[in-house]
Amino acid sequence: MKKVPIYENLLAKIAILEEQNRRKDERIAYLERLLYGAKSDRIASKVPENQPGLFDEFFQEAMDEKASQIEQAAKDIEKAALKRRQAARKSPSRPAKYRYSGLEERTTTLMPEGVDADQYDIIGKDVTRILHREPAKVWVEVIERPILRAKSDKALPNPRICQAKAPQSIIGGNHVGADMLAQIVIDKYRYHLPEYRQVKQYADLGVKLPTSTINGWVHAVASKLEPLYEAQRREVLGSDYLQIDEVPWRIADSPGKSRKGYAWQFLDNRPQSHGLYFLYMNGSRAGTVPRAELRNFHGAIQTDGYGVYDYFELQDNVTLLGCMAHVRRKFTDAQTSHPQLAAQAVKWIELLYTLEANLRDEGADYERIAAERQAKALPIMDAMEKWMEAVHTQCTPADPMGKALDYAYKQWPKLRRYALDGRYHIDNNPVERAQRPSVMGRKNYLFSKSDSGAIDNAIFYSLIESCDIVGIEPLRWLTDVLDNLRDDTPPEQIREMLPYYYKKSQG
């Protein structure tokens, strides 16, 4: 009876050791690619001049081994895709009528001219809905706080005097409300309106404000939101699946010129995402930034092929995933030099994406997604890997096709790992899509004047884009937060103000 737990423990330890060995084998293969991969051209150097067809035969033999499996997988994928596309064609792309849910409706009844309505019965009606917009309105709240003296103490030298407390100021000075500040921030960081354009808008509404005043308000709000930003950072790092990328921001902190800085973006890609955050560390793009930020991280991270992420390949607590979209992009560009070869690669990659689209359309659960990838996607990827080894001799390392093969071949072990878990994505596109607001903002207000300004941008983009990710309206959220956040707000209440928990509290 006592031997059973010991036997089970030994089996568990063996399974752990086998998994560790598998991970080490993957890492060794990956490092060998970095050292001896396509760019060194060692494969080509081993081909004898009198055997030009050696790799063609090798590739054909490898393909024959998997031919039936790959062919069946491709047929299944295309069959499901055809069914999905036919169903999509049956659904009209334009709705039969538009509905404006939640908007106020003001009804006007139009009777025929020259007709006495009392002489007619209404037997039906036609209804037309016309969408209108009222101009924005800026107004001033005047708060009066009377000073009261007790009537019975009128003749006393020290009468009882009382007065209501002054309202809590949002930022210093108590002269601008949370709704006004929230609108300024949302207009800049969600709708990409620079401060000087907002000055013109407010002038049209009767409010004369210098740009420096609005700029000062924005910086003050960023300082106020800093505790929420740090709490958001901790929440995202608590995920077990992150996507990471870097986005360039211009910093104009020298007279007459600007420099390129980088913000790191960390996206929580769990099914119930808590959002994201941007991290700006003096504009550095060095590998020390993600290594320090993820020093206690356990889980999967998905990145592009930027070399600083190779460090995580050696960490036992991290599963490093690749991005197929970057591979596809390079093969698409390579069609300028080797159109037929590049088109073949794109075709195979497109088949992998078609499988993903089919699974999404069917609403497949994560367990089935992983099983389908292992049964259909991995054989295709194995064949493509052999194909890359074979066709490498047909191009030089310097041309676009050679570069595409080099990049894809070295990334292939990381790319295959998306089949391990149905939650994982085939590419890094979600984190790249989340960069769009900051890129649009950069095109409008061009640059930050200092590193501190870039840090403010990181705070706002982190919180506002997290609102979009979790599905709440950013203006309402920011107004509520500014109305209720105080300097002495305890950490547990700050956490409840984060977009993810705010949505849960709203039901």
Image (tube, helix red, strand yellow):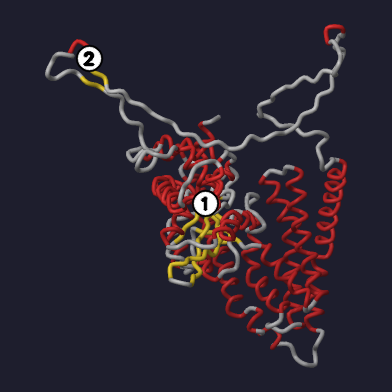
| Image: 364 above or below 261 | above
Q: Tell me the CA gap for discs 2 and 1.
A: 52 Å
Numbered disc in front, either 2 or 1 = 2
Label 2 environment density (alpha carbons within 10 Å; few <14, some 14–19, many ≥20): few
| Image: 169 above or below 432 | above
Q: Give me the disc on residue 194.
A: none
Identify the mark nearer the N-term, 2 or 1: 2
Report which quarter residue 490 is drawn in: top left
- Asked if residue 248 lies left or right of residue 129, the reply is left
- Asked if residue 460 lies left or right of residue 143, the reply is right
Residue in the image at 33% along x and 25% along y: 145
SS for dot 1: helix
Total numbered badges shown on the rendered structure: 2
Residue situated furthest bottom in the rendering: 50
x and y percentages locating residue 219 in the rendered image: 42, 51
Label 1 environment density (alpha carbons within 10 Å; few <14, some 14–19, many ≥20): many
Residue situated furthest front in the rendering: 114
Closest to the observer, 99 or 471 = 99
Closest to the observer, 279 or 327 = 279
Residue in the image at 49% along x and 70% along y: 258
- Asked if residue 477 lies left or right of residue 351, the reply is left
Contact between marks 2 and 1 (CB within 8 A): the answer is no
The amino acid pointed to by label 2 is: Ala
x and y percentages locating residue 45 in the rendered image: 69, 88
SS for dot 2: loop
The amino acid pointed to by label 1 is: Tyr
Q: Give me the disc on residue 461.
A: 1
Q: Which residue is mark 2?
A: 150
Residue situated furthest left in the rendering: 157
